[in-house]
Amino acid sequence: MVKVFFYQSDGPTTKLLFTLLEKSRSQDWNILLSCSDQNEVEFLHEQLWVQPDNRFVGIGVAGSEFDQFQPVLLSDKFLLANDPQVMIATGNSTIEPDIVDKFTRIMVVFNQNDQKELEASREKWKLLSGLGHHMQLYCQDRNGWALKAEANQEKKEVN
């Protein structure tokens, strides 16, 4: 079963995206960063290369002959060229139900102050919870991140 994590940010999500990319790469997972359109792909490609403290995550934009070698592949299409274990979807992107099971984890990152992203993320929640996946919603507040909602909890076996 795919584990799905929603991250509701109280502002722009670029810094959060970078942190999630770093954490996923520390597990040696390949990632598909699913964007809403080509403009978002280009924006994030530029922004994710510019990080403080010399932090670095290798990323590439889908569409080259080297896609399969990219640890992080940015795309506005559902490509599995880099054999990703993780999909990180931005707020306005879409998720195709027939590819969900190809991933170990799915993360949806959205800005709660952007009504369009908020509505699109609610639709993703309905879709993925309806498919029976274990879901968690984390919200950002003054103290950091807190679990605010959960659906389809994993059943623990009692011995």
Image: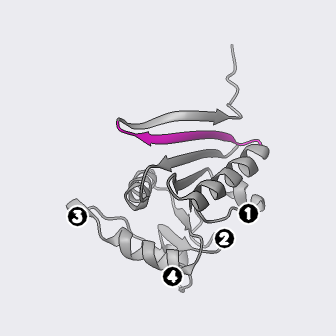
- The residue labelled by disc 3 is 54
- The residue labelled by disc 2 is 78
Residue type indicated by callout 4: Phe
Are circles 3 and 4 on residues that touch, CB within 8 Å?
Answer: no
Measure how far apart labels 2 and 3 are at the Cα level: 30 Å
Magenta residues, as a range? 132-142
Neighbor class of circle 2 (other Cα within 10 Å; few <14, some 14-19, many 20+) is: some
- Dot in front, 2 or 4: 2
Q: Is label 1 in a helix, a strand or a loop?
A: loop
> Considering only vertical position in the picture, is 157 above or below 78?
above
> Considering only vertical position in the picture, is 65 above or below 104?
below
Q: Is label 3 in a helix, a strand or a loop?
A: helix
**Lateral position of residue 101 relative to residue 83, left or right:** right
Measure how far apart labels 3 and 1 are at the Cα level: 35 Å
Q: Is label 4 in a helix, a strand or a loop?
A: loop
Q: Please check the rendered image and state whether residue 105 is part of the magenta-colored stretch, yes or no.
A: no
| Dot 3 or dot 4, earlier in sequence | 3
| Dot 2 or dot 3, earlier in sequence | 3
Are circles 2 and 4 on residues that touch, CB within 8 Å?
Answer: no
Identified at 53% across, 59% down, the residue is: 114
Are circles 1 and 4 on residues that touch, CB within 8 Å?
Answer: no
- The residue labelled by disc 4 is 66
| Dot 1 or dot 2, earlier in sequence | 2
Measure how far apart labels 2 and 4 are at the Cα level: 16 Å
Residue 148: percent from the left, percent from the top?
A: 55, 34
Measure how far apart labels 3 and 4 are at the Cα level: 25 Å
| Dot 3 or dot 1, earlier in sequence | 3
Q: Quadrant of the C terminus?
A: top right
Q: Is residue 85 visible?
A: no
